Amino acid sequence: LLGMAKTFDKFDFLKLFTLILFLFSFTKSDDFLFWTKLQRLNFTDFQGTVIKQDSTNGETYRLGTISTSIDVRIRKEVTSTIFSINAGMEKKQSWIRNSGDSVTLRHLQGSFDICEIYARKFRKQIKSVKSLEEANGLYGFLSSQKEKEQVEYENANAHDKNGISKLWQDSINNRLKSLDSFQFSKIILKLTK
């Protein structure tokens, strides 16, 4: 897609971006789990097929994988554009080898929490954009930052006996708390383009 994007002009790219988001909005909700403050991950949320090799589809920890993304849905109104922005987990792409392995579950919850941090950053920063093109650029930037942090998280916690170190857990909790005013998914903007 990146190679193809070079042949599109800006208008075509925006149409493609909007179409992808529109089509993604029809994903079965049973297959996609949104992050919530009140509900932590549980073993039944992991419905993917257990694989033996590391996967590039998600973050891999010794005995499990979680596939996360920032889900963005856009609805155009007469005078505004409504964005719904959520941290999500693809249940059928995520797995835990041994049900009952609370260390792996705790580790994967940390990955999901990191995704929520970046969804909140997107909600905070999107308020300053003036067009769908700017929103798309911001989405790409924050998604790449999220992926970079997920790699750092994996490298730092892959062998932690608790699944996540106290340093990382405290950092995640503090950042979620500092972004608490951006926990709600709906953002209404008046875009000029």
Image (spheres, rainbow, N blue to C red):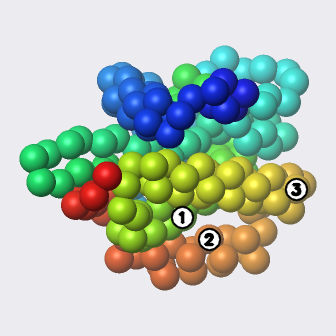
For disc 3, the neighbor class at 10 Å (few under 14, some 14 to 19, many from 20) is few
The amino acid type of the residue labelled 2 equals Ile
Q: Earlier in the sequence, mark 1 or mark 3?
A: 1
Q: Does residue 169 appear in this view? A: yes
Q: Is residue 144 above or below residue 162?
A: above
In this rendering, would 20 be left or right of 54?
Answer: left
Q: Is residue 128 above or below residue 108?
A: below
- Residue at image point 44% right, 42% down: 71
In this rendering, would 105 be left or right of 75?
Answer: right
Q: Label 2: which residue?
A: 172
Q: Earlier in the sequence, mark 2 or mark 3?
A: 3
CB under 8 Å between discs 2 and 1 = yes
The picture quadrant where one finds residue 57 is top right
Which dot, 1 or 3, sits closer to the camera?
1
The amino acid type of the residue labelled 1 equals Ile
Q: Earlier in the sequence, mark 2 or mark 1?
A: 1
Q: Position of residue 92 (x, y in %)?
A: 55, 23
In this rendering, would 136 be left or right of 152?
Answer: left
- Residue at image point 62% right, 56% down: 141
**Which secondary structure, mark 2?**
helix
Q: Label 3: which residue?
A: 155
Q: Label 1: which residue?
A: 117
Which residue is more in the foreground, 178 or 91? Answer: 178
Q: Does residue 96 appear in this view? A: no
Q: Is residue 45 above or below residue 162?
A: above
Q: Position of residue 160 (x, y in %)?
A: 85, 60
The amino acid type of the residue labelled 3 equals Asn
For disc 2, the neighbor class at 10 Å (few under 14, some 14 to 19, many from 20) is some
- Residue at image point 23% right, 51% down: 81
Which dot, 2 or 1, sits closer to the camera?
1
